[in-house]
Amino acid sequence: MSRVASESAFPAVAWGEAVDAFSDLGFVATSAAGVIVGWSAGAEAITGIAADAAVGHDVVAVLALPGLDLPSVAGRHPPRVTGRVELAGGGTRLIAVTVRATPSRGFALRLEEVDEPRGPGVEGSAQRYARAVDGAGDGVWDWVLATGADYHSPRWKQLLGFAPDELPNHIDTFFARLHPDDVERARAAVAAHFEHRTPYDLDLRLRTKSGEYRWFRTRGEAERDDRGAPVRMTGTMIDVTERKLAELEVQRTNAELERRVKHQTGELRRFVTVIEASTDFIGMADPEGRLLYLNRAFRDALGPHPSNDLWSTRVHELYMPSMSERIEREARPAAIRDGHWLGETELRRFDGTTIPVSQLLLAHISPTGQVEYFSTIMRDDTQRRRMAAELRLRADRLAVAAAAGMVGIWDWNSGDDAMTWDDVMYALYGVARDRFAATYAAWLGTIHEADRARVDDEVRRALREQKPVDTEFRVVWPDRTVHVIRAHGVVHRADSGAPQRMLGTNWDITDIKRAEAEIRSLNADLERRAAEVEASNKELEAFSYTVSHDLRAPLRAIEGYSRIVQEDFAPELKDELQEYLRDIRRNTLHMGRLVDDLLAFSRLGRQAVAKQAVSVERLVEQCLAELRPRRPEREVEVRLGNLPPCLADRTLLKQVWFNLLDNALKYTSKRDRAVIDIAGERRAQETIYSVKDNGVGFDMRFAEKLFGVFQRMHRQEDYEGTGVGLAIVQRMIQRHGGRVWAEAQPDVGATFYFALPRAEHDVAEP
Amino acid sequence: MSLNPERAEIVVVEDNPDDIKLALRAFRKTDAAEHVTILRDGVEALEYLFCTDRYAHRKGEPPPRVVVLDLKLPLIDGLEVLRRVKSDPRTKMIPIVVMTSSSEAKDMISTYTLGANSYIQKPVDFASFTEVIRGISSYWLTVNQAPLPGG
């Protein structure tokens, strides 16, 4: 049914018939101007336009496809346009028109139906086939099983880089170029299609003309005989190398990703195991302070949650309020700004106690600058801080000790003879750093000539015998002053045992030496003086003995003879003579008392003070009991106040009270009614006692004479006495380490005070 | 008060003539005056009490009833006399009253330690002195029970 414009012979008819044989491909031939000269049956079938209506007309007008300008379409690649044609029976059909210029300057057009854009659903075999031949990019093949003939369209060959006549149309051509690894797969697919009608659609590699393999997707459908046996198979092929490579790349990437995910999952698990096992406290929280994670050490450190709801805890509850405030103010901003913050903080346990920690706070920031979460690592710092404090204290102590003790430290390497001194050493030797050669010889040179050989010897012996050296020597400063140094050193040895270095200390003992010398001289002095004192004590004793013995004898004689005269010759004596004899005897007796008192006073200086707890109250009562009978006629009111006990020599203290009370009674003798107040008062350091009388008193201008030996404030005829009583009182109080004083007013009275130092602890009643 | 004149003997060892004179006057006021023997120094005292040398003739005679001994004596002092008398079994029974001017505690302690029977400080006041002498003679010659001679 095709018409060919030329009235040619049979071959033309045959060619026409051949073209018409493909009802699903339309072939059109035009003149150079585009006038249709041939219109195949296939063209009629595809477009629904009869040959009569087409031939002789402009193809552009007939097909009415936009963009169908023959020369321009033929000149581009691919030389094809797609568009819709109106069907006679209504509706449209999507067709593709491929245009090629012919040698006779006409044009050849091929028309193909194109699949409509498909919706979901199963693709039918006809459609599939139609799609198989779709597009000028597809190569077409047609394999006759009986002969092995296998038509390969020029496009098929072109896909492999061959010209249409370069490859034989035989099935062997296909298998020859098939990648060895794909042969089996291809055979199996064909067999499956034949036997089980499994769709034949697979990707294969074929060797191109250049020798490289490219990927092709091939699809085909078998034609079968009446019995269903395949006789022929037709299909298309398209180059999918790029897609395949992309696919393969995707597969490879996926495999890699999978491997990585697997690996990372494992790694993550290992990380968590490590973090859980860590003794550091590790935790994470979101920016709102909700806990995301706490490792085991952290959970253990916090202790049991009071309401068993650990994860309700907010970050701020992990600190004391002030610390939480500091984290908020200082740590968080720094972590956000710098990514991390490191500081010393305190973790608050649920029971309220705290643990000092060093804390690292990390902020995890998203690419958009948002804080995603915070993580923290804390280390229990209790031990470290304690040790640090201890170390600081030790270092301080050492520094203080070294500074206070002016201890210089030296180090001498006997190998290269280098001596290293600290600043104190230079101060001890009075030399400037740049004036000292810092060698052993230079050091020896500073030592006093008289000591040098000995010290050199001691150092050498220390090195030889591996013993520490501890010695003293004099050094002579550049200003010629001499200073005494105490030196100590230890020997450090190399593994070979050969002495390598000595190190040690120096300090200045000049002052100590001077003080020692002074002490020695003072001691000698003291010993000498003690001997002198002892000698003079002995002399004094001898003197006292003589006084007491020899001075009293003549007094006794004078008194005795006066008395005998008075007794034996009374009738013969004038009254006046009697009177004089009485005066002689009175004076003699008075002198006897003076001698006795003087002796008692001198004995006091020599007598040891044996302190013991004394009840002053009882002592005073005893004294009063002994004193009262001496003045039985007197009216005396004694008022006893508080009298705390004290620590004193009982005998001596009794003498003090006796003398003071005796005085009070004596100097109130001219009062009709004597009043004596006795009191005591405990102070922090001493106990003060007082005896107050309403007696004759004395003029305070003479108060300093009061306690002198033989010092009297009153005339003998008014108040008898030797003037030794208060001197004895003062002596005794002084020997107790106390003090005594008096206040008085003439004709009003006197108050005597004495104070005794208190012992470390209060004295109990004995 | 009955005294056996043969046995009632008081020995006073004293070198100070005034004290001797005053003592004898004081003894005269007692019944014992005629039995008082005065010895002038330590050596004489020892010879008398041990019946040697100048007093060898006293051998076999009874010892004095009491010895009034001063400490400050020529040649041998009172403490030495006391020590020798009290450390000898033949004489240690003899009562010895030390009467001295000294009021030194040291003297008093040594005296008693050596075995003296009494210690009296000579009072300056003669009236008191007389009383003391009277007391001594009445106590040692009358009140005190003397041991048997040699016993």
Image: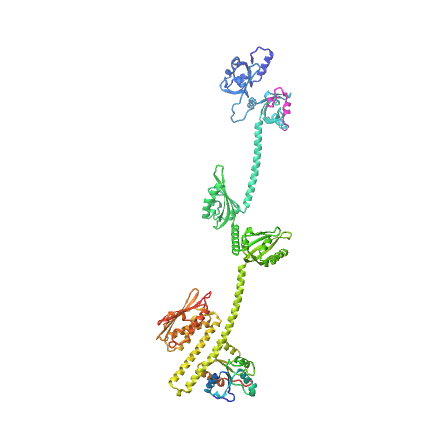
Queried whether the magenta region covers residue A176, the answer comes back as: yes
- Here the colouring is rainbow
Can the viewer see residue A621 in this picture?
no
Q: In front: A732, or A141?
A: A732
Where does the image place residue A713, in percent across and percent down from the top left? 39, 73
Q: In front: B83, or A225?
A: B83
Q: Quadrant of residue A597?
A: bottom left
Where does the image place residue A286, in percent across and percent down from the top left? 48, 42
Compared to A344, does A536 lie above or below? below
Can the viewer see residue A406 in this picture?
yes
Q: Quadrant of the N terminus of chain A?
A: top right
Where does the image place residue A72, in percent across and percent down from the top left? 53, 18
Q: In front: A151, or A606?
A: A606
Compared to A626, does A37 lie above or below? above
Query: For the image shown, how many numbered marks are present on the structure?
Result: 0
Q: Residue at x 52, y 65 (%)?
A: A522
The magenta region covers A157-181
Q: In front: A380, or A158?
A: A380
Queried whether the magenta region covers residue A475, the answer comes back as: no
From the viewer's perspective, tell me whether residue A739 is left or right of residue B89. left
Compared to A468, does A240 lie above or below? above
Where does the image place residue A548, in percent across and percent down from the top left? 47, 78
